[in-house]
Amino acid sequence: DDRYPHKKYTLGYAGRPSGPAFYVSIQDNTRNHGPGSQQKRNPNEADGNFGRVISGFDVVDRVHKMPGHGFIGTGEDVVGIQEMTIQVPSADGTYTVWKGA
């Protein structure tokens, strides 16, 4: 879906079926994670893209520069998220803090 491209600083679900792990793209990953990238026989198969970073880009960049390769989360290289605010876009282009279901 063109509304949810896997561009830099977007969030996608990892694994099959999607979740609960997620990643933040640090580059345009549409070719690797967008429609048609996961299975040749299913051109619509893709990692679920569910959001984007709207602030804190420096934090994402710092995490990416940490030692280790591939998935972070084994041994001593665990990254823990202490706090995160989910915001939803409003019709006027601003964001509102999501209060939960």
Image (cartoon, rainbow, N blue to C red):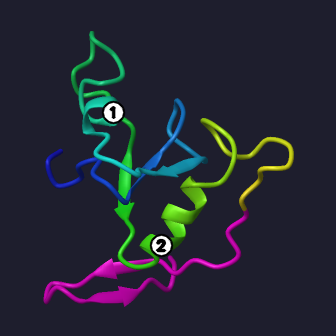
Instruction: Please tell me which residue is depicted at 15% across the width and 84% down the height of the picture.
Output: 91
Q: Nearer the viewer, residue 31 or 57?
A: 57
Q: Toward which corner of the image does residue 90 lie, by quadrant?
A: bottom left
Residue type pointed to by label 2: Asp
Image x and y of residue 62, in percent: 56, 64
Labelled pair 2, 1 in contact (Cβ < 8 Å): no
Q: Secondary structure at mark 1?
A: loop
Q: Secondary structure at mark 2?
A: helix
Image x and y of residue 76, in percent: 85, 49
Mark count: 2
Name of the residue lying farthest toward the top: 41
Instruction: Please tell me which residue is depicted at 30% across the width and 87% down the height of the picture.
Output: 95
In this rendering, is residue 91 above or below 50? below
> For mark 2, does the 10 Å Cα neighbourhood hold few (<14), some (14 to 19), or many (20 or more) residues?
few
93 magenta-colored: yes
Q: What residue did someone put label 2 on?
A: 58
The stretch in magenta equals 80-101
| Disc nearest the viewer among 2 and 1 | 2
Instruction: Please tell me which residue is depicted at 13% across the width and 89% down the height of the picture.
Output: 92
Q: Nearer the viewer, residue 78 or 15?
A: 78
Q: Is residue 44 left or right of residue 67?
A: left
Q: What residue did someone put label 1 on?
A: 46
Q: Toward which corner of the image does residue 51 lie, by quadrant?
A: bottom left
67 magenta-colored: no
Q: Is residue 51 left or right of residue 101?
A: left
Image x and y of residue 7, in percent: 27, 51
Query: Label 2, label 1: how many angstroms apart (C-alpha)?
Result: 27 Å
Q: Is residue 46 left or right of residue 2?
A: right
Per the picture, the main secondary structure of the magenta-coloured stretch is loop
Residue type pointed to by label 1: Ala
> For mark 1, does the 10 Å Cα neighbourhood hold few (<14), some (14 to 19), or many (20 or more) residues?
many
Image x and y of residue 93, in percent: 17, 85
